[in-house]
Amino acid sequence: MLNISSIDAFTSYSGFAAYDSSKAAVLALTRAMAIDHGRNGIRVNAICPGYIDTPLLAPYFERTGNPDQARREIASLHPWGTSADPKTSQT
């Protein structure tokens, strides 16, 4: 089984309480299921993608006062120096 969480499961930001807590809950569920079913040969894992430039992040970028700079800062947090862009399917 594969669950989808987020990097936000490990950190929190102002205004994202519901999102961040739901992603942390997915990790807790994943761990519990892995423990419960591992002896039966069932693997349970979670993928925690980094930042993806979607409409969800737009309000955050706008609140910074300099959206372009904020996007560059978010991109710099990733080892490859860019955040994912679902419009072009590139990372």
Image (cartoon, rainbow, N blue to C red):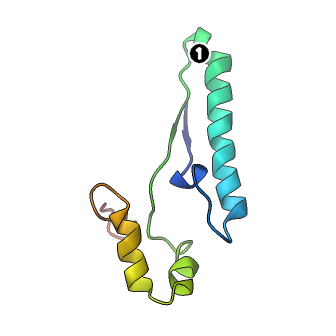
Residue wearing tag 1:
38
Residue 74 percent across, percent down from the top left = 41, 68
Q: Nearer the viewer, residue 86 or 19?
A: 19
Residue 21 percent across, percent down from the top left = 70, 53
Q: What amino acid type should be assigned to the residue bearing mark 1?
A: Gly
Where is the C terminus found, in terms of image quarters?
bottom left
Residue at position x 35%, y 67% from top?
Answer: 75
Residue 13 percent across, percent down from the top left = 62, 66
Residue at position x 65%, y 47% from top?
Answer: 24
Where is the N terminus found, in terms of image quarters?
top right
Toward the left, the furthest residue is 80
Residue at position x 66%, y 60% from top?
Answer: 19
Position of residue 90 in the picture relative to residue 2 (left or right)? left
Q: Nearer the viewer, residue 61 or 87?
A: 61
> Regarding mark 1 in the picture, which secondary structure is present there?
helix
Residue at position x 69%, y 52% from top?
Answer: 22
Q: Quarter of the image holding residue 52?
A: bottom left
Position of residue 70 in the picture relative to residue 30 (left or right)? left
Position of residue 69 in the picture relative to residue 6 (left or right)? left
Q: Is residue 9 above or below residue 72?
A: above
Q: Is residue 6 above or below residue 1?
A: below
Q: Is residue 91 above or below residue 14?
A: above
